Image (cartoon, grey):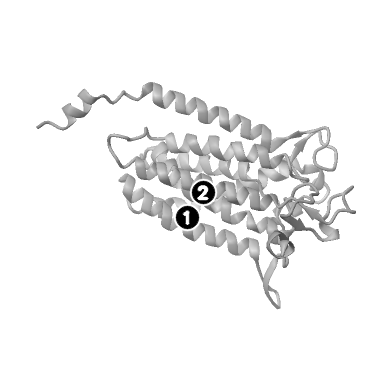
């Protein structure tokens, strides 16, 4: 019974294959994430009072910038794998994208877009990030189908079976590993739920949060989970690493997560510092009898 409910085994990266046409699970999950994110962000944008067409206009630019940023970030830290065959760095369908690179590329695109359209950068981020973290929760299952981004060996009741050809050097004798894709997927869904609760609460004008607060909370909450889960990974991006599991090196995702937590905390401090305090007298003045 334990094996039936707790052992994960990937069916492989391909969902359908018909001649030269191949539909991969990873691509399908990304497409699903984009469709859900588009509808959700449009809904949140309308509730925030943003222009209806704003998200539709932004989405193609955002997706392209995020993908380019994610790939450049990954290849930059794994250049030793691509320096003798740099054309392979374009093979994004084989995996190898980094969420922090996507966040950097996407944020730059949103900032430029908002400046050109004279929109509030923080308002737009606040309506986008719930969709982003939900998409992260869905997209992590792509790692499951690709047999990648898994954790260290484990004998826990919940575990992931990894084929021999996908096991890292030095760990060939182990069959079962931590399903870190599942850990991060669950964490991201929890962060999404938190953001949606806060977004709904924000519609009460007496409890209104400053624009940008949700974005700061996303940076802190997502990064806290990433630091913990990244510590289990066998294939992290590293500085000065030795295989397996970044022995003797610094995990880039953990370092970046610490930086994002600092940025998020600084942002919350600044927003609360500059936000006028709401008192009973203020409320009374806003609601004359």
* x, y percent for residue 143: 68, 56
At x 62%, y 45%, the residue is 99
* x, y percent for residue 45: 36, 48
147 or 116: nearer the viewer: 147
Q: Which residue is mark 2?
A: 132
Number of residues whose C-alpha sits closer than 10 Å to that of mark 1, classed few (under 14), some (14–19) or many (20 or more): many
Which residue is outermost to the left? 289
Between the C-alphas of marks 2 and 1, the distance is 7 Å
Quadrant of the image containing the N terminus: bottom right
Tell me the quarter of the picture where residue 127 sits. Answer: top left
At x 64%, y 64%, the residue is 25
Left or right of 258, for residue 119: left
Q: Is the C-beta separation of discs 2 and 1 under 8 Å?
A: yes
Left or right of 276, for residue 162: right
Residue 50, visible in the rendered structure: no
Tell me the quarter of the picture where residue 199 sits. Answer: top left
Q: Which residue is mark 1?
A: 37
Which residue is outermost to the bottom? 19
Residue 76, visible in the rendered structure: yes
Secondary element type, mark 1:
helix
248 or 54: nearer the viewer: 248
Disc with the residue nearer the chain's start (2 vs 1):
1
At x 82%, y 36%, the residue is 241
Secondary element type, mark 2:
helix
28 to 259, vertically: above or below: below
């Amino acid at each position: 019974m334990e094996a039936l409910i707790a052992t994960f085994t990937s069916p492989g990266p391909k969902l359908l294959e018909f001649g030269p046409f191949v539909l991969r699970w990873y691509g399908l999950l990304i497409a699903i994430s984009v469709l859900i994110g588009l509808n959700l962000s449009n809904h949140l944008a309308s509730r925030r009072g943003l222009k209806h067409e704003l998200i539709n206009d932004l989405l193609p630019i955002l997706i392209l910038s995020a993908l380019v940023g994610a790939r450049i970030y990954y290849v930059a830290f794994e250049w030793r794998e691509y320096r003798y065959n740099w054309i392979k760095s374009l093979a994004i369908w084989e995996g190898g994208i980094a969420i922090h690179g996507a966040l950097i590329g996407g944020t730059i695109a949103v900032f430029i877009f908002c400046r050109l359209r004279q929109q509030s950068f923080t308002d737009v981020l606040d309506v986008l990030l719930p969709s982003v973290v939900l998409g992260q929760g869905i997209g992590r299952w792509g790692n499951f189908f690709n047999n990648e981004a898994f954790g260290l060996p484990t004998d826990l009741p919940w575990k992931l079976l990894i084929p021999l050809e996908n096991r890292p050097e030095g760990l060939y004798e182990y069959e079962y590993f931590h399903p870190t894709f599942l850990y991060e997927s669950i964490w991201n869904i929890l962060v999404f739920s938190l953001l949606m609760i806060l977004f709904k609460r924000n519609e009460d004008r007496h409890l209104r949060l400053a624009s940008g607060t949700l974005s700061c909370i996303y940076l802190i909450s997502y990064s806290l989970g990433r630091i913990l889960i990244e510590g289990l990974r066998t294939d992290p991006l590293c500085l000065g690493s030795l295989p397996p599991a970044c022995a003797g090196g610094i995990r880039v995702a953990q370092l970046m997560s610490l930086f994002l937590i600092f940025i998020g905390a600084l942002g919350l401090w600044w927003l609360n510092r500059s936000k006028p305090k709401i008192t009973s007298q203020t409320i009374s003045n806003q609601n004359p009898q």
